[in-house]
Image (spheres, rainbow, N blue to C red):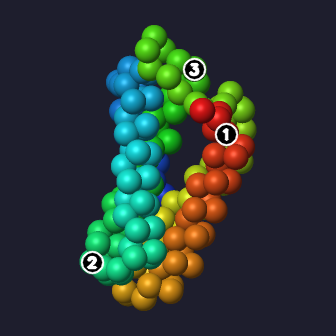
Amino acid sequence: MKKTIARSVLAVLALSVATAASAQVKPEDQIKFRQAGYRFMSWNMGKIKGNLEGTYNKDQVAAAANAIAGIANSGMGALYGPGTDKAIGSVKTRVKPEFFKEGENVGKLAREFNAAAGDLAKVAAGGDAAAVKTAFGKLGESCKACHDKYREED
């Protein structure tokens, strides 16, 4: 019981800090920071894909999976603050307006993505390429689910 209360208090505090932090970051910087996070995750996904299609290096895969999980679970949702739903000057965004209106579904997709990223990191630590391929596919599916619904085409 005490652990559950402590976890709840920590979760509320973390959310408060993330919300306060996003309020201190200009909207155009929020867009830039979230795009940088997604680019870094994409680069690491490319490293994993390259290992799965070529010579498999379990250490490289584990490092890339840990980077993805770290970013995915870093509180990136705080970078979708007010005013980040559209371009600001030269800072463009491809997020659809529906993203900001469908919070419950967005939260569900985000939780699924975070769980898939964490699972990939856990599986990658074991070094089994076949298991990594399966977990990597699930992570890709969770990316696609959000992109299909909430990301504008180029």
Amino acid identity at mark 3: Lys
| Secondary structure at numbered mark 1 | helix
State the separation of the CA atoms marked 2 and 1.
33 Å
How many numbered circles are shown?
Answer: 3
Q: How crowded is mark 2: few (under 14 residues within 10 Å), some or many (20 or more)?
A: few
Quadrant housing residue 82 = top right
Q: Residue at x 72, y 38 (%)?
A: 102
Question: Residue at image x 65%, y 48%?
Answer: 146
Whether residue 138 can be seen here = yes
Task: Identify the mark nearer the N-term, 2 or 1.
Answer: 2
- The residue singled out by tag 3 in the image is 86
Please report the residue visible at 64 percent of the width from the left and 54 percent of the height from the top.
144
Q: Which amino acid does label 1 sit on?
A: Tyr
Question: From the viewer's perspective, is 6 left or right of 97?
Answer: left
List the residue tagged with mark 2: 59
- Mark 3, mark 2: which one is toward the viewer? 2
Query: Dots 2 and 1: beta carbons under 8 Å?
Result: no
Front in this rendered view, residue 1 or 93:
93
